[in-house]
Image (spheres, rainbow, N blue to C red):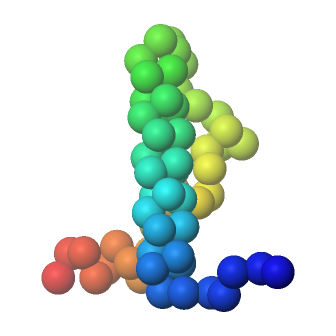
Amino acid sequence: MTMPDTKSGREKKGLNKEAQLESELAQRELGAEDQQEPPRFEDVDDELLAEPSELDELDN
């Protein structure tokens, strides 16, 4: 029997995912300090890129 979907469970899962992504970003930043050349476009993760419309909202 599976557990029912609850709001607290979804929130906990979201917090875990956020912590996981922050950890991955921190590891990338530490690795980037050791690199001499900038990352290639293929190495950039689109999950961390902002949409142009989101940038407009930040400017206002």
Q: Nearer the viewer, residue 3 or 59?
A: 3
Q: Which of 3 and 39 is in front in this view?
A: 3
- As drawn, is 40 to the left or to the right of 30? right
The residue most toward the right is 1
Q: How many numbered marks does the figure carry? A: 0
- As drawn, is 45 to the left or to the right of 11? right
The residue most toward the left is 60
Residue occupying image coordinates x 67% and y 39%: 43
Q: Is residue 51 visible?
A: no
Image height of 25 relative to 38, above or below = below
- The quadrant in which the C terminus is found is bottom left
Residue occupying image coordinates x 31% and y 79%: 56
- The quadrant in which the N terminus is found is bottom right
Q: Which of 10 and 60 is in front in this view?
A: 10
- As drawn, is 51 to the left or to the right of 58? right
Image height of 30 relative to 14, above or below = above
Residue occupying image coordinates x 47% and y 12%: 34
Residue occupying image coordinates x 25% and y 75%: 58
Q: Where is residue 17 in the image (x, y as percent from the top left)?
A: 53, 59
Q: Can residue 18 be seen in this view?
A: yes
The residue most toward the front is 1
Q: Position of residue 27 (x, y in %)?
A: 49, 29
Q: Where is residue 24 in the image (x, y as percent from the top left)?
A: 53, 40
Q: Position of residue 2 (x, y in %)?
A: 77, 79
Q: Which of 24 and 10 is in front in this view?
A: 10
